[in-house]
């Protein structure tokens, strides 16, 4: 930077254009205003706003400006695209694809797109990612074009190209324009146009659609149709339904202008020839079309059907006072329907969300007559001028719905539809159909809640089973309240009954003259009224939730107040018959009341009070003996009495107190808290007896067992206690010790009733071992705890003593254990024979059965591993040897396993390679194996040659883990190397002709391995589905020339590949499919074949052939007796038939073959047929309805002729003609006349003769509008 000079600022392009290069003589031009020289402005790449220090464009801007460089770059790009589309068009015409063209354009696009940024042209310095993206897009486009992938715009591009270039080689070897041959308009000429003069008409509502007015229909659009006329005045007559008065309505000018506008559209569009105008009827009445005038003020022909416009039908639900109903009630609902009778209403009835649709039809007032009730349809009604139409007036008709509501739940009636006599329908949308889910209006819906009726009856009381209560007491009336499901939450109800006092009942027990009615409001189902007055109660009515219920039987109940209980006592002494003393008191009890009775009394003996005693008496009389055991003064006081009704009535008076001095006789009692005792088998029973009286005593007793009695006596007993001891009880069963009598010192004997039962076990407790799997022997894992099942009898818990018989110590260990379950277990460790020596239960010692007193426990054997010896596996020197195999072969050996599967084996694999040059070092690996069975196969390692050693180091099964002292097992196997074979010069090509009789040249091969070798060679031809196989004889050298017989070769190129080689060690090697190969080419003279078998063609068609051989080809042919020669660079040969004649191919040759193959292929080309209608002129004829026109068709070609002609709408300005019908016809002459009477344009669209056809219908034939025809 020079001092005093301006700084160098970057040049920024304006308007996206680079600055022009300054002239060379202006670079150092001095400034008139500043003496300091300005430096040269730096050259900047166009389009960048920052300073650039890199090099400029390859072509300097002073030599070629940037716009010019960009123009040339764009021109080259367009030229390349044109070249690319030229290649693509050739592929499309040939209907082929080319991989080489694809590679060619990939290379060209790569060079252009990646070379363009290197030119550094301003504005074209593209970034690397952008260039890569554009290149990928071009690659996809190249793939689609060069592989002829169908494109959506392919036809458009071809059509666009053919606009500029549409030429192909013809038979004359000149380029001709194909479109001029295919689209020869002179083949079909002329047309016939027929016009039929129209007649106008007008009609009101020809389809007789029903119309009605209502809240949603403010007016009724009645259609009026005008055919072939434009009205200027239209009158409509309306007859009022209420007054029968008529009024004339004229269409307004705006409405007439609307009809005129539609009529003009109809003149341009034949499909809209009939004009429809919707007249808005805003009042009910009968409408008819009156006067209609066209633009000439002439009356237009009109039909005058009547159209009724009535009020739209509607319906609603009459309001009800109460929406609650009881089951069995009538719905008592009325639907109000209004409209023109006969009416029909459709309503829905929903019970607990179960919908059912119902309807009522033919609704009309009484005495109503209407033509709508006859068989005539509403559309067939015709109303005269003075005819009464009052029947069309709307009527209101009530529809009562009185159905029995037999199901409880939610009921809903809703109106869905209503119809009138004309067919007008008003539908009321349900919430399910409404988009917003709005409910129906309230006047269309009525909801009811139908409730169940209650039921009551008396429970536990009727005329045969009265209620009894004490006087002054009250009780609940035993009313049972029921209501069928669904049971409501509120079960409050009202009950009413009739009551008659007990003294007013009739002789039959019914209500007498005095009857009162009482009621009770119960709060819930279990709430019952209280009653106390004796008499007859009869249920009469029950109601709940305003529903009156049903009173079921039993409905009557008798309430009584029984007499209070009373007791009368009488007593007498009980004397001792021996000594004459009083020993007790005998008391007789007479009772009044309601049994059962309970009487309490207190007893005092010698001034001491004993606990109160009670007597339960079921009858009205009772006797009790009061005999005290102790001598002295005794007092008895009866205190209370109760019966079934009255409780704890106090007894007061001297009649309830008794006193007596008693000196009792001798007596004895067994002193025991239990009436029954138990004893062990063989034990002696001991029973304590308490004696009363004056001693000494003599006691008699007996022992009863199994029906036998044994009496025993003990005398001279001085004490008041004595112990009876029995002999040993050696039999099991129930013994009874019964006291017979006792005698005191006075000699008075008292007979006794005391006894005691002793239950003696029928057998002693026993102990035995149970079974496991029907044996008293079990196998266990060494060191595990084993539970041995026990079977014990007696009363637990048991004490079991056992020992192990296999103990080797001098003193065997005896073990005692406690068992609480009779099917318990004995837990032991170790193995041996365990024996039970003794057993005790909770009371008695037991016995041991020697047969079941022992249980054997043994251990599972530990797992073992061995090698299965076969013809390929042998044992030598403490290890196993597997027969040698070849490298890559499948080999293995089997392991034999014993124990409890599954097994787990660990082993090592060591590989020692063969000692050859380049061999890898030794290696080893550890592996694991899980085996579910006793035998398992080991897959041998054969991937590499050498010696493999398998060392099995540990073994475990389902029961035992691997042991440390496991002895390893070693297995060895040798793997031999595979032989190999390869071509000495892979890729070499061998060529010869098929006609050559000598054998093919030998192909040198190099072999490695152990001789002799057997070689297998594969011969694969491109056209063959499967290859040929050639096997050589044994080869004893390492080099060999393979000679392939000629009969295994085919024409063209075939690849020779070594498939398999086997050496002397029986090892063989299979080559990979992609291995090295050589080529053998077999040539033959070229041939040509037509792509179609037919011999007759039409002018404009393509004659296509395929050539076999090596391009380019030369084809010699004759046409119209002139011989011509053509060249074909590809295997396709095609020519356009531009004129009729005979085309014959004579010979053909190719590049590879020097011979010319003679052929004789002959094709005949026929001229196209032609047709003219009306001498080839456009003739227009106007006729009236019913007239006819003759249409003349003339043909050129070979009969018979089959032609297709159409009748279209006559063309109008701004509208396209539309085809109305298409007809086909045949003519065996060169002319034909057809008569026509329908309007339209008649023209021929297709013609064909005996051989060829031509058509102008683009929808049917696109590329080839002609084809060859065949006639039988």
Image (cartoon, rainbow, N blue to C red):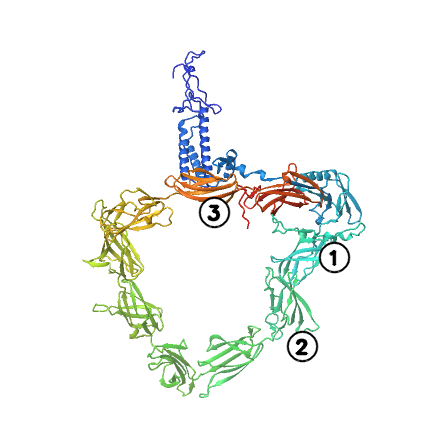
Residue 669 seen in the figure: no
Mark 1 or mark 3: which is in front?
3
Secondary structure at badge 1 equals loop
Q: Earlier in the sequence, mark 1 or mark 3?
A: 1
Q: Earlier in the sequence, mark 1 or mark 2?
A: 1
Residue 881 is drawn in which quadrant?
A: bottom left
Where is mark 2, residue-wise? 508
Number of the label disc, if any, that sits on residue 1093: 3
Instruction: Give the total of numbered labels.
Output: 3
How far is the residue under mark 1 from the one under mark 2? Answer: 71 Å
Work out whether 161 lies above or below 323. above
Nearer to us in this view, 499 or 454? 454
How far across and how far down the image is residue 177, in percent?
Answer: 51, 35
Residue 585 seen in the figure: yes
How far across and how far down the image is residue 203, in percent?
Answer: 73, 46
Mark 1 or mark 2: which is in front?
1
Residue 672 is drawn in which quadrant?
A: bottom left
Quadrant, the N terminus = top left
Secondary structure at badge 3 equals loop
At 60% from the left and 58% from the top, the residue drawn is 352
Where is mark 1, residue-wise? 374
């Amino acid at each position: 930077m020079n001092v005093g000079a301006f700084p160098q600022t970057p040049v920024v392009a304006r308007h996206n254009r680079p600055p022009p290069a300054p002239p060379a003589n202006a670079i150092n031009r001095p400034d008139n205003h500043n003496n300091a020289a300005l430096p040269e402005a730096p050259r900047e790449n166009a389009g960048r706003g920052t300073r650039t220090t890199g090099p400029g464009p390859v072509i300097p801007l002073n030599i070629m400006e940037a716009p010019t460089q960009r123009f040339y770059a764009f021109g080259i790009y367009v030229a390349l695209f044109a070249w690319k589309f030229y290649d693509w068009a050739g592929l499309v015409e040939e209907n082929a694809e080319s991989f080489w063209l694809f590679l060619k354009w990939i290379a060209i696009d790569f060079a252009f797109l990646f070379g363009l940024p290197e030119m550094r042209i301003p504005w074209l310095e593209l970034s690397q990612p952008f260039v890569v993206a554009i290149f990928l897009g071009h690659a996809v486009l190249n793939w689609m074009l060069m592989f002829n992938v169908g494109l959506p715009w392919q036809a458009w591009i071809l059509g666009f190209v053919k606009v500029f270039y549409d030429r192909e080689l013809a038979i004359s070897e000149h380029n001709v324009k194909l479109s001029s041959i295919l689209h020869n308009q002179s083949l079909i000429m002329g047309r016939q146009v027929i016009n039929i003069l129209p007649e106008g008409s007008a009609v009101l509502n020809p389809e007789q659609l029903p119309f009605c007015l209502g809240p949603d229909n403010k007016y009724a659009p009645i259609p009026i149709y005008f055919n072939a006329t434009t009205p200027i005045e239209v009158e409509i007559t309306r007859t009022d339904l209420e007054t029968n008065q008529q009024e004339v309505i004229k269409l307004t000018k705006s409405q007439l202008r609307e009809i005129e506008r539609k009529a003009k559209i109809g003149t341009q569009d034949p499909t809209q020839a009939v004009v429809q105008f919707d007249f808005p009827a805003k009042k009910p009445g009968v409408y008819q079309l009156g006067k209609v005038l066209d633009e000439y003020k002439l009356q237009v022909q009109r039909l005058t059907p009547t159209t009724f416009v009535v009020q739209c039908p509607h319906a609603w639900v009459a309001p009800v006072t109460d929406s609650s109903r009881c089951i069995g009630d009538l719905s008592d609902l009325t639907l109000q329907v209004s409209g023109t009778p006969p009416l029909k209403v459709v309503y829905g009835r929903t019970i607990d969300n179960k919908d059912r649709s119902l309807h009522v039809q033919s609704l009309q007032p009484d005495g109503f007559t209407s033509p709508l009730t006859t068989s005539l349809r509403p559309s067939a009604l015709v109303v005269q001028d003075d005819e009464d139409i009052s029947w069309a007036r709307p009527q209101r008709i009530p529809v009562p719905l009185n159905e029995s509501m037999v199901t409880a739940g939610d009921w809903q009636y809703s109106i869905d539809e209503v119809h009138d006599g004309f067919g007008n329908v008003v539908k009321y949308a349900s919430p399910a159909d409404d988009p917003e889910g709005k409910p129906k209006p309230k006047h269309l819906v009525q909801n009811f809640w139908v409730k169940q009726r209650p039921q009551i009856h008396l429970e536990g009381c009727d005329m045969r089973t009265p209620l009894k209560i004490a006087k002054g007491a009250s009780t609940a009336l035993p009313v049972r309240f029921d209501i069928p499901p669904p049971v409501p939450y509120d079960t409050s109800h009202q009950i009413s009954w009739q009551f008659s006092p007990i003294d007013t009942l009739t002789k039959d027990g019914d209500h007498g003259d005095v009857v009162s009615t009482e009621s009770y409001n119960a709060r819930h189902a279990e709430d019952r009224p209280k009653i106390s007055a004796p008499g007859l109660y009869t249920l009469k009515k029950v109601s709940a939730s305003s529903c009156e219920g049903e009173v079921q039987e039993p409905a009557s109940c008798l309430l009584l107040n029984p007499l209070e209980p009373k007791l009368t006592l009488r007593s007498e002494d009980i004397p001792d018959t021996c000594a004459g003393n009083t020993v007790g008191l005998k008391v007789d009890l007479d009772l009044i009341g309601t049994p059962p009775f309970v009487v309490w009394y207190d007893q005092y003996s010698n001034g001491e009070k004993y606990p109160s005693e009670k007597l339960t008496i079921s009858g009205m009389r009772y006797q009790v003996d009061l005999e005290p055991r102790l001598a002295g003064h005794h007092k008895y006081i009866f205190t209370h009495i109760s019966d079934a009704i009255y409780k704890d009535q106090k007894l007061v008076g001297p009649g309830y107190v008794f006193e007596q001095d008693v000196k009792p006789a001798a007596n004895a009692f067994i002193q025991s808290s239990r009436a029954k005792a138990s004893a062990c088998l063989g034990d002696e029973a001991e029973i304590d007896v308490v004696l009363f009286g004056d001693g000494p005593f003599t006691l008699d007793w007996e022992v009863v067992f199994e029906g036998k009695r044994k009496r025993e006596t003990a005398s001279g007993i001085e004490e008041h206690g004595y112990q009876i001891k029995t002999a040993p009880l050696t039999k099991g069963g129930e013994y009874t010790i019964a006291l017979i009598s006792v005698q005191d010192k006075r000699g008075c004997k008292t007979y006794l009733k005391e006894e005691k039962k002793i239950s003696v076990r029928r057998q002693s407790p026993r102990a035995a071992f149970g079974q496991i799997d029907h044996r008293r022997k079990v196998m266990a894992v060494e060191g595990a705890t084993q539970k041995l099942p026990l079977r014990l009898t007696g009363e637990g818990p048991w004490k079991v003593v056992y020992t192990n018989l296999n103990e080797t110590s001098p003193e065997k260990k005896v073990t005692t254990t406690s068992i609480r379950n009779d099917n318990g277990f004995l837990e032991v460790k170790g193995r041996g024979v365990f024996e039970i020596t003794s057993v005790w239960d909770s009371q008695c010692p037991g016995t041991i059965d020697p047969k079941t007193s022992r249980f054997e426990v043994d251990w599972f054997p530990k797992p073992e591993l061995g090698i299965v010896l076969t013809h390929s596996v042998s044992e030598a020197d403490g290890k196993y040897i597997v027969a040698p195999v070849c490298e890559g072969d499948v080999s293995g050996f089997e392991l034999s396993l014993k124990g409890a599967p599954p097994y787990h084996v660990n082993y090592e694999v060591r590989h020692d390679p063969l000692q050859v040059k380049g061999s890898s070092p030794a290696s080893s690996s550890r592996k694991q194996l899980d085996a579910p069975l006793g035998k398992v196969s080991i897959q041998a390692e054969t991937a590499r040659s050498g010696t493999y050693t398998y060392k099995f180091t540990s073994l475990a099964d389902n029961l035992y883990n691997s042991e440390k002292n496991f002895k390893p097992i070693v297995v060895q196997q040798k793997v031999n190397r595979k032989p190999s074979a390869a071509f000495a010069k892979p890729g070499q090509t061998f060529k010869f002709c098929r006609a050559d009789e000598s054998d093919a040249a030998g192909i040198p091969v190099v072999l490695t391995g152990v001789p002799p070798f057997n070689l297998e060679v594969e011969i694969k031809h491109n056209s063959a589905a499967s290859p040929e196989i050639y096997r050589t004889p044994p080869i004893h050298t390492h080099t060999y020339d393979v000679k392939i017989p000629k009969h295994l070769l085919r024409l063209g190129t075939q690849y020779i590949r070594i498939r398999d080689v086997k050496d002397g060690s029986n090892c063989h090697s299979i080559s990979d499919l992609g291995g090295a190969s050589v080529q053998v080419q077999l040539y033959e003279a070229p041939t040509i074949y037509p792509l179609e078998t037919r011999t007759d063609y039409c002018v404009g068609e393509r004659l296509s052939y395929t050539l076999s051989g090596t391009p380019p080809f030369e084809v010699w042919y004759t046409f119209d007796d002139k011989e011509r020669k053509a060249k074909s660079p590809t295997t396709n040969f095609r020519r356009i038939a531009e004129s009729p004649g005979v085309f014959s191919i004579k010979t053909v040759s190719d590049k590879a073959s020097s011979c010319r193959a003679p052929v004789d292929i002959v094709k005949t080309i026929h001229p196209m047929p032609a047709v003219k209608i009306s001498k080839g002129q456009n003739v227009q004829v106007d006729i009236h309805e019913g007239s006819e026109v003759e249409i003349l068709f003339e043909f050129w070609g070979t009969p018979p002729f089959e032609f297709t002609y159409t009748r279209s709408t006559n063309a109008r300005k701004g509208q396209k003609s539309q085809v109305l019908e298409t007809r086909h016809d045949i003519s065996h002459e060169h002319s034909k006349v057809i008569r026509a009477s329908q309007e339209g344009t008649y023209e021929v669209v297709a013609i064909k003769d005996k051989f060829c056809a031509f058509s102008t219908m683009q929808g049917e034939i696109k590329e080839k509008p002609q084809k060859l025809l065949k006639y039988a």
